[in-house]
Image: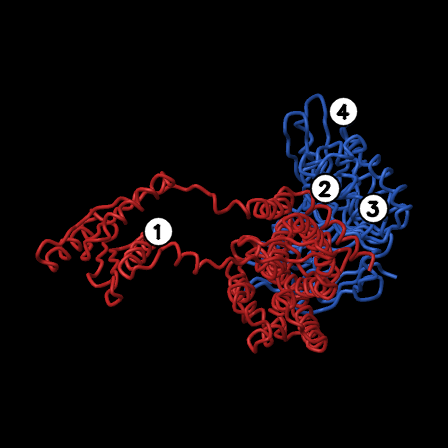
Chain colours: A blue, B red
Amino acid sequence: MDALELNSVCKTFGQVRAVDNLTAKIPAGSIYGFLGPNGAGKTTTLRMIMNIIRPDAGNISVFGNNLTEQAKSHIGYMPEERGLYRKMTVRGILAFFGALKGLTSSELSRVVPSWLKRIELSDRANKKVEDLSRGMHQKLQFAATIINEPDLLILDEPFSGLDPLNLDLIKGIILDMRDKGKTVIFSTHDMHGAETLCDYILLINKGKIILDGKLGDIRSQKASNAVIVEVEGETGFIKTLPIVTNVVQQKDTLEITLGKGTDPQDLLKAIVGKVRVRKFEVKRPSLHEIFVTLVGASNAENY
Amino acid sequence: MRKIIEIARREYIDTVKTKTFLISLLFTPILIVGIGFFTSRISQVEGGRPPVRVAVTDLTTQLASQIEAAMGKHNQSNPKRQIIFESLPARDDTNAVEEQGRKQLRSGKADAYIVIDQNIIDGAGRTHVYTYKSKPTMLDATWAVEEFIRNAVVAQRCKVQNVSQKLLDDIRNVSIERVEIGETGNEQHVQSRGQTTVKMMVPFFFMFMIYMGILGIGQQMLSSVIEEKNSRIIEMLLSAVSPFELMAGKILGLGAIGLTIIGLWTAVSYGPILWQGISVDITGKLLFCFVVYYILGFLFFSALLAAIGSVCNTLKETQEFMRPVVLILIFPMIAWFKLVQSPDGVFARVLSLVPPISPLVMPLRISAGSNVSNFEILASIVLLVMAIFLMMWLAGKIFRTGILMYGKRPSLREIYRWLRAS
C-alpha cells in the first residue's frame, strides 16, 4: 500500500493557483523529497496532507484512508515555522508532545532520555526553549515530531539553517527511520542534501509537477554525456578529436562534451599518454543542475 | 481524553508560573485583608484640604459669634481641615450685602456664603447656603457649618422659649446599638458602622469574584491562543490533537486555575471577616451555587473567548470583540445595589435566569438573603447549560477554522459562513 496518495489536488489562494492538479503516489518505506523553488507550493501541499488546509479539489489519502484523528498518532509533522512553547524546558517539550502522541508515562521515561541523547541535548535537558540556539531549537522540534517513531514523517524544510554537524545528525536519523520501514517525506531546496538522501523526488514549480520519480532513474535519463577531466600538459589537441563536440576549460579542469553514443572510455584512451590525467569523471547531472534547467525552462514556458 | 488532560495540565502549569498569575493571585487577598484591617479605622483617615472660607451674613445678629466660636473649636481639633469665618454684616441694605456676598463667591474670595434669615428663631425663616462651582472637597466643611448653624439656632430658640438646652439634649438622646449574636450563649459582637458596611458588601464580593474569575482568566485564554497562533506551535499541536481537544484542554486547564484563585481568595477573606466579628451566613446552598455557577459561567465565557482569540492575531485585535463581552459582564455589576435591595423582585429574578448573566446574579441573590426556590435555581442552571452547549458548538466551529488563519482578521460575515459550512 502506498503511504500517501494525492489525486488531482488543487488549492487556490485568491488569484494564485498554489497547487495545480497535483497527483503523486508515495510508496511506503521510501524517502521522498519535495523539491522546488520558494513559493512553488511545497508547504501548501504538505499542509493539505495534514489537513491543516483543505484542498479546493481532489483528494488525499494517508495509508489508504482520509486523515482521521486516530491516524495522527502514526504521523509526525514538522511545520516550516519553528514554534515551541518558549518557557518550557527541553525535556518538558519532549514529554508533552510524546504524551500527546499517545506514549504512556513509562514509555516516556525510557524514550525521552534516549532522544535527548540522540539529538545531543542531554546536557541541556532543563534549559528553557527560549534559551536555545537556532540549531538546538530545530533539533528539539525534530525530536518532538519523531518521538513516537511514527510510520509517516512529513518534514517541511527540516534542514534549513543547520550547520554541517547537525545536518548529518538529522540525515542520519532520517536514514535510520527509513531502514526501520518508515516513510519520510521532506521538502527542501537544498539539492545537495536531497541527492544524498532521497529515493524518490518530486519537483514542483508554480504548483505543477515537473518531475516525479526515482532519483537514480532521473539522473541517468538526464545524463548529458559529458566528462570532467583534470590534466597536466598540453590540452589543445583535445578539441580536435572527432569524438569531442565541445570543450570548456577553466585552468586545469576541462569539461568535455562527447558526441552522441560515444563511450567515455574512448576519450580516456585518446588522451592517456598525451597528458597526465589527474581526474577523470563521467558526469551525471546533479540535482542542482536538473533543477535549474527544468525550473528555468518551466518559468520560461509560463512567460 | 488523555490528550485533553495533557493539554490542560500544560496550560495550568505554564500559567501558574507566569508573573501575572502571581500578581493577580496576591493582589486581591491583600486588598481584602487591607480593607478588613482598616474598616474600623477608616474614619480616622487624616486627609487635608485647603481651608474653606465661609462668609456669613447673620440677619438675626444674635448667632454670628456662636457660629464663629464653633468654627474655632472645629479648627482646633481639625487643623488640616479648617473653616475660616468671615462676617458680612448687613448694615442697612440687605440686598446690597447679598450682592456683595455673591460677588465674593464668584471671585473666589469665599467658598460659601451663608445668609441667616432674621426670623429663623421664630421658625419662619431659614438659612440659605450659597455656593458657586462647589467642589466635593468642601463637602465636610459645608456639613460642619450647617451643624454649627443648627446648634446655634437651637440654642437661641431654647433661650427665647426658656427651655433648658441640656434638658432638650437629654430628651433627644436615644442610644442605639447594633449587635450580631454568635453561635453560643452570650457570644455577641457589637457592630460598628464599618462592619455593617462590609456585611452589605458580601453579596457584591461573591459577584465580583465570579466576574474577576471569568474575565481575568479569560484574558489568559485570549493571550494563550494568540501566542500559540503566532509562534505557529498550533501546527505541531494539530498534528497530534484535534481542534476540539485543544480547545477543551485549554478551557479545562484555565478553569482549574480560576478555581484555584477563587478558592484561595475565599479562604483568605474568610479569616479577616471572622476576626472582625462579622458573621456572614454562608450556607451550604450558597457555596454550592457559587461553585457551580462559577464553573458554568466560566465554561460559557471561556469558550467564547477561545473563539475570539482564534480569529485574532494580536491582543489589540481582540478589543473590538471584547467590548460587548465586557458590557454583558459589567451590567449586573452596575445594577448590584438594586439587586441586593430587592433580591426577589422581578428584575433580579429575570436576570438570574438569563444565561450569560445568571452566573453573576444568582449567587448575588442567594447571598443577599433571598430564599430562592430550588426550582428556580434548577431552571436557571438548565438554561445556562443549554447556552453552554450552544456556545461550545459555535466556538468549536470558529476555533477550528480560525486558529489556522493568518493575515487579515475575518469579518463577521465570513465567520458566519464558517458556521454554516459543514
Q: Which residue is mark 2?
A: A88
Query: Is label 4 in a helix, a strand or a loop?
Result: strand
Residue type indicated by callout 1: Ala
Residue B108 position, x and y percent, is: 21, 48
Few, some or many residues within 10 Å of mark 1 (<14, 14–19, 20+): some
Q: Chain of mark 1?
A: B
How far apart marks 1 and 4 lie (CA) works out to 113 Å
Q: Which residue is mark 1?
A: B144
Q: Nearer the viewer, mark 3 or mark 1?
A: 1
Q: Which residue is mark 3?
A: A147
Q: Which residue is mark 4?
A: A278
Instruction: State the image quarter where residue B416 is shown.
Output: bottom right
How far apart marks 3 and 1 lie (CA) works out to 78 Å
Of residues B339 and A4, the one drawn nearer to the viewer in this rendering? B339
Residue type indicated by callout 4: Arg
Q: Are marks 3 and 1 in contact (CB under 8 Å)?
A: no
- Considering the image in quadrants, where does the N terminus of chain B appear? bottom right
Q: Nearer the viewer, mark 2 or mark 3?
A: 2
Residue type indicated by callout 3: Ile
Q: Nearer the viewer, mark 1 or mark 2?
A: 1
